[in-house]
Image: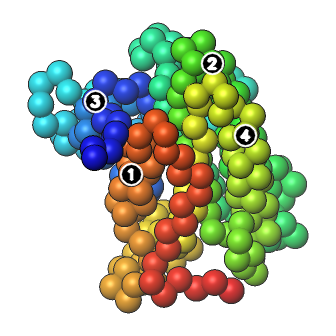
């Protein structure tokens, strides 16, 4: 019996935070599989570098297409600009991969504007993108929302009070939203990575390299491959939650 799988060739995908870390690895992988991907970030140089890297991985003529813009997911103006670009460049939306996020300190060690900005980026930005994406997906009666969460929502490690709150919010939002939109053929998934080799880590490059070698940290590409797996399941299959972590993940 053949199992139905969905390829990504020609799929219109909005990827938030595609300029660094997991987002950048995901951008390259989706483009290589023939998707039409729009991404954005706050830094122009990082955006251009990520787009160049992704375009270099497109293997066939007419397959895979990437574009981007500078925008801030934490602001209404940023969200408006992104979805105007979605309409203009993609002509609709099949999938949203929400990946843009910031690290944080304990709330009593952050300025008031700083912790609020993290919440606006990590949680409010996800909700705003989901709302705008749903408007478009409901018109076509189908789509897929994928949110990059974190195992921080489960392990609640010391020092991660603000960050864990945002990721727990994403988890609750996604699991509830899934029940609200399943009847219009829209999937909702969450991936919960453990420690990943990204710029968000508060350690040196040498320390990150050692953590990778010792199986205490994941390569960003491994998380991107998990994202790809979720997006390519058949129409009858929902990957609701997928937790991926290094073999020796620290959990406290």
Q: Secondary structure at mark 2?
A: helix
Q: Secondary structure at mark 1?
A: helix
Label located before the other in sequence (4 or 2): 2
Label located before the other in sequence (3 or 2): 3
Residue at left offset 46%, top offset 78%: 246
Residue at left offset 41%, top offset 40%: 234
Q: Residue furthest left?
A: 60
With respect to residue 159, does 30 lie above or below? Answer: above
- Mark 1, Cα crowd under 10 Å, few <14 / some 14-19 / many 20+, is few
**Residue 166 visible to an observer of this rendering:** no
Image location (x, y in percent) of residue 72: 62, 35
Residue at left offset 49%, top offset 68%: 244
Label located before the other in sequence (3 or 4): 3
With respect to residue 91, does 28 lie above or below? Answer: below
Disc 3 marks which residue?
9
With respect to residue 117, does 21 lie above or below? Answer: below
Q: Mark 4 or mark 2: which is in front? A: 4
Left/right of residue 75 with respect to residue 28 in the rendered view: right
- Seen from the viewer's position, the closer of residues 188 and 208 is 188
Q: Mark 3 or mark 4: which is in front? A: 4
Q: Are marks 3 and 2 in contact (CB under 8 Å)?
A: no
Disc 1 marks which residue?
229
Disc 4 marks which residue?
179
- Mark 4, Cα crowd under 10 Å, few <14 / some 14-19 / many 20+, is few
Label located before the other in sequence (4 or 1): 4
- Seen from the viewer's position, the closer of residues 20 and 170 is 170
Q: Residue furthest front?
A: 1
Q: Secondary structure at mark 4?
A: helix
Question: CA separation, marks 4 and 1?
Answer: 21 Å
Question: CA separation, marks 3 and 2?
Answer: 21 Å
Disc 2 marks which residue?
138
């Amino acid at each position: 019996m053949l199992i139905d799988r969905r390829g990504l060739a020609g799929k219109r995908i909005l990827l938030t935070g595609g300029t660094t870390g997991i987002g950048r690895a995901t951008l390259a992988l989706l483009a290589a599989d023939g998707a039409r991907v729009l991404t954005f970030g706050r830094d122009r140089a990082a955006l251009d570098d990520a787009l160049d890297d992704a375009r270099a991985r497109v293997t066939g003529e007419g397959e895979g297409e990437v574009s981007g813009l500078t925008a801030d997911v934490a602001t209404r103006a940023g969200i408006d600009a992104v979805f105007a670009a979605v309409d203009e460049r993609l002509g609709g939306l099949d999938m949203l991969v929400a990946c843009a996020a910031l690290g944080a300190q304990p709330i009593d060690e952050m300025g008031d504007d700083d912790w609020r900005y993290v919440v606006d980026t990590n949680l409010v930005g996800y909700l705003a993108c989901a709302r705008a994406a749903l408007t478009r997906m409901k018109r076509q009666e189908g789509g897929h929302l994928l949110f990059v969460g974190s195992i921080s929502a489960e392990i609640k490690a010391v020092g991660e009070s603000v960050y864990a709150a945002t990721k727990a919010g994403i988890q609750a939002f996604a699991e509830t939203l899934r029940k609200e939109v399943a009847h219009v053929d829209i999937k909702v998934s969450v991936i919960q990575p453990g420690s990943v080799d990204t710029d968000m880590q508060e350690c040196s490059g040498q320390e990150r390299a050692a953590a990778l070698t010792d199986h205490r940290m994941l390569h960003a590409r491994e998380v991107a491959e998990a994202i790809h797996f979720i997006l390519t399941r058949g129409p009858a299959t929902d990957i609701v939650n997928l937790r991926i972590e290094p073999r020796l993940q620290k959990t406290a």
